[in-house]
Amino acid sequence: MQHDCVINKRIDKDRILDKTRALDQFLAQIERRAFKIAELAVSNREEALDIVQDSMFSLVRKYANRPPEEWTPLFYRILQSRIRDWYRKNKVRSKWMSWLGLRKSEDGEEMENALESLPDPHGRDPSQVVANEHSMERLDDAIQVLPLRQQQAFLLRTWEGLSVADTAIAMKCSQGSVKTHYSRAVHTLRDALEEHWI
């Protein structure tokens, strides 16, 4: 009887460790993209980092025990909610700035963004990155001028690859609204990017 209890405790401990590892891996994979989404939305690196960090803590606190396939829409729902909260607090709805480049430290010196200096997980060399810079700048500019809901729908569907249903969960709206926002974003971007459109 005591032996069975010890085995059950070991099995429970292993399950908890497996779940923790899976959650850590999920957060590591999603962190960089979530940061860029938040930064595009709030136009402030420090605020974006806070929003992403808060979203991650919230996911861990509230939904760590949910199945891993539910984490992505739940995380983006939390992230979009935090972004909307930021807008309510700061009342800045139309101001956008680029998420590319450098930021300044308190003493006015330029500092490299820590997330952007991480090695490329896809193994691209710097010449490949430089070759795409102009197109990326055009895309960045075009995404920044989209209305917030269109921006969210476009980034979640295209960049994150979420389904319409998962995007609706993340944005707290109907699937029809997701389709409308996404369609309008695509048409606006296609017109703005012309020769850069793939």
Image (cartoon, rainbow, N blue to C red):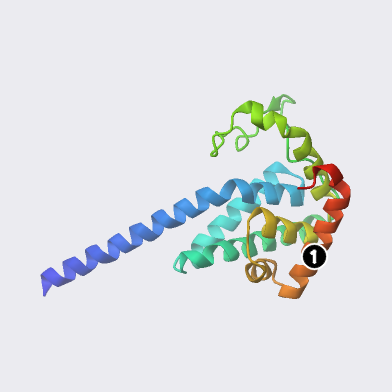
Q: Secondary structure at mark 1?
A: helix
In the rendered view, would you say 136 is above or below 159? above
x and y percentages locating residue 122 in the rendered image: 55, 39
Residue 147 visible in image: no
Which residue is nearer to you in this view: 170 or 128? 128
x 60%, y 57%: residue? 55
In the rendered view, would you say 108 is above or below 6? above
Figure quadrant of the N terminus: bottom left
Answer with left or right where residue 23 lies relative to residue 144: left
Q: Residues within 10 Å of mark 1 (few under 14, many from 20)?
A: some
x and y percentages locating residue 153 in the rendered image: 73, 61
In the rendered view, would you say 165 is above or below 101? below
x and y percentages locating residue 101 in the rendered image: 73, 32
Answer with left or right where residue 63 lies relative to residue 41: left
x 78%, y 44%: residue? 139
Answer with left or right where residue 149 lies relative to residue 114: right
Quarter assignment of residue 59: bottom right
Which residue is nearer to you in this view: 129 or 69? 129
x and y percentages locating residue 148 in the rendered image: 80, 58
Residue at the spot of label 1: 181
x 87%, y 48%: residue? 192
Identify which amino acid the numbered label 1 is placed on.
His
Answer with left or right where residue 157 lies relative to residue 184: left
Callout count: 1
Which residue is nearer to you in this view: 6 or 35? 35
